[in-house]
Amino acid sequence: MALVSAKEMLQKAKAGHYAVGQFNINNLEWTKTILLTAEECKSPVILGVSEGAGKYMAGYKTVVGMVNGMLEELNITVPVALHLDHGSYEGAKKCIEAGFSSIMFDGSHLPFEENVEKTKELVAICNEKGMSLEAEVGSIGGEEDGVVGMGECADPQECKAIADLGVTMLAAGIGNIHGKYPANWAGLQFDVLDDIQKLTGEMPLVLHGGTGIPEDMIKKAISLGVSKINVNTECQIAFAEATRKYIEAGKDLEGKGFDPRKLLAPGAEAIKATVKEKMGIFGSIGKAE
Ligand code: 13P
C-alpha cells in the first residue's frame, strides 16, 4: 500500500476512541522494525521524521525512497503516513516536494499572527496535494533535535483559531515534555485539554512527549480527544539498552557477532517490543484489519 495522509486514520481513531502512534525513525532498522510491527499488529502507523533525523538519513528524498521501497518490498498493507515532525516553514516545503504524505508545521515559537498566516498557507498547499497538516499551539517542554520549548499550556481560544483554518490535527501544549519526565512533573493539564476539545470539536488532538506518560494519563487523554500520540525517546532508550547488553555480554566477540545485522538485531527487537506495548495502550491494534 502506498503512503497515505494521516487524515482518515486519525478521524477514525477520534470516532473510535483510540489513538494512532507516531513513532520517530532514525535509520533503516527503526523504519523496518516499526513498519513490520504495525503490520503484525494490524495497526495504522505514522512514521515521524524530525528535521535533524531527516538530515542524518541523508535528506528527505532518501527517507521517502527508503519508506516507499519498504512498503512495497515488505508488503505492508496497513495505512502508513510519513510525517515531518516539528517542521519549520522551509522544512515543510521541502518535505511536500520530497513526497512526504503528512507535515507538522510548528509555528508555536512565532508570534501568533505569523503562526496563523504560515499555517493557513500550508493548509492550502496540503489540501491541494491530499496531505495532512499538523499545527501547534502552546509549546512542548524540553528539547527534541534542537527544537526547544518552555512548555507553556496552549490557549484554547488560539487552538480554536488554528483549528478553524482547516488543519488536520492539532498539537496543543498541556504540560507535556519531550524526553524523560522529571520526578517533580505536574502531570498533564486535563482541564486545559478538555477546554480545547470543547472548542475544537471533531479535530483530532495530538499528544507529544509520549515517552514516560503513565498509562492512566494516556487513557484519560484519549477520552478527552487525543487521537495521535508521539513516541521517540522511549524507542531510543530501548534500542541503546539492548545494544549495550549485547556488547557487555561480549556477544560481538563470539563468532561473527560483530556483523551489523547481528549487532543491531537486539536493539531492533527492543524497538518492536516498545512499539507493540504502546500500540496496545493506545488501542490501535487490529484497527487496520
Ligand atoms: P518523546 O521523545 O518524549 O517520546 O516525544 C516524542 C515527540 O513528541 C515527537 O514530536
Image (cartoon, rainbow, N blue to C red):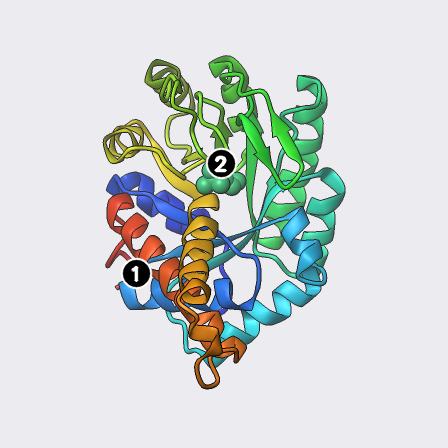
Residue 283 as seen in the image, left or right of residue 26: left
Q: Which mark is residue 148?
A: none
Q: CA distance from mark 2 to mark 1?
A: 29 Å
Report x, y in % for residue 285. Answer: 25, 56
Front-most of 28 and 119?
28
Q: Secondary structure at mark 2?
A: loop
In depth, the one of 60 and 150 nearer the eye is 150
Q: Is mark 2 within 8 Å of ligand 1?
A: yes
Identify the residue at image location x=47%, y=44%: 233
Looking at the image, tell me whether mark 2 or mark 1 is earlier in sequence order. Answer: 2
Q: Residue at x 41, y 19 (%)?
A: 196
**Residue 92 appears left or right of 30:** right
**SS class, disc 1:** loop
Asked whether the viewer can see residue 140, the reply is: yes
Q: Is residue 122 above or below residue 238?
A: above
Circle 1: residue type: Ala
Position of 60 with respect to 149 (left or right) is right
The residue depicted at 63 percent of the width and 64 percent of the height is 63
Q: Position of residue 170 (x, y in %)?
A: 49, 32
Foreground: disc 2 or disc 1 = 2
Q: Within the image, what quadrant is residue 111 found in? A: top right
Whether 163 is drawn above or below 102: the answer is: above
Q: Position of residue 19 (x, y in %)?
A: 33, 43
Task: Check disc 2 and give the amino acid type.
Answer: Gly
| Residue drawn 42% across the image and 73% down it | 251
Whether the residue under disc 1 has CB within 8 Å of ligand 1: no
Give the quarter of the figure containing the C terminus. bottom left
Q: Residue 288's mark?
A: 1
Quadrant where the N terminus sits is bottom left
Tell me if I can see residue 1 in this picture: no
Instruction: Find disc 2 in the rendering and name its residue.
Output: 179
